[in-house]
Image: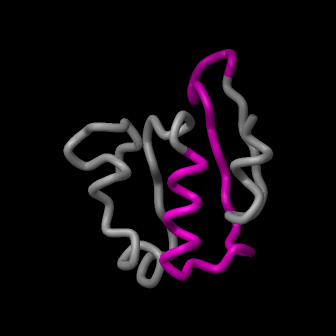
């Protein structure tokens, strides 16, 4: 799922309930700017806040940054 706001498949168009209930692994691309909204949507759709989560910023570059946490806490850790 692309995280670009305004994109055809961006956060506003994502099937949140289906993702929250039926996916073992979800990958959002280009989503750091809307991470808080994504986590809020997943949590309000029923996903467990203790679900493991990770954010990779600038992946594949010398400036890559990886953050691991839970879905309920990852947006606070990312900033």
Q: Is residue 38 magenta?
A: yes
Front in this rendered view, residue 6 or 51? 6
Residue at 45% in and 49% down: 28
Front in this rendered view, residue 76 or 55? 76
The image position of residue 57, as x and y in percent, is: 62, 31
The image position of residue 62, as x and y in percent, is: 67, 15
Which quadrant would the C terminus be assigned to in this image? top right
Q: Is residue 18 above or below residue 31?
A: below
Count every numbered label the image shows and give the total.
0
For the rendered model, the colour scheme is: one colour
Q: Is residue 75 magenta?
A: no
The image position of residue 47, as x and y in percent, is: 57, 78
| Residue sitting farthest toward the left | 8
Residue at 67% in and 52% down: 54
Residue at 39% in and 69% down: 16
Residue at 76% in and 52% down: 68
| Residue sitting farthest toward the top | 62
The image position of residue 67, as x and y in percent, is: 75, 44
33 relative position to 28: left or right:
right
32 relative position to 3: left or right:
right
Q: Is residue 39 above or below residue 15?
A: above
Stretch in magenta:
35-63
Specify the quadrant of the image occupied by residue 55. top right
């Amino acid at each position: 799922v692309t995280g670009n706001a305004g994109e055809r498949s961006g956060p506003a168009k994502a099937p949140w309930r289906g993702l929250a209930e039926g996916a073992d692994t979800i990958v959002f691309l280009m989503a750091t700017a809307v991470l808080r909204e994504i986590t809020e949507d997943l949590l309000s759709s029923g996903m467990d806040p203790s679900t493991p989560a990770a954010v990779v910023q600038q992946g594949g570059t010398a400036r890559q940054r990886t953050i691991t946490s839970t879905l309920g806490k990852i947006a606070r850790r990312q900033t």
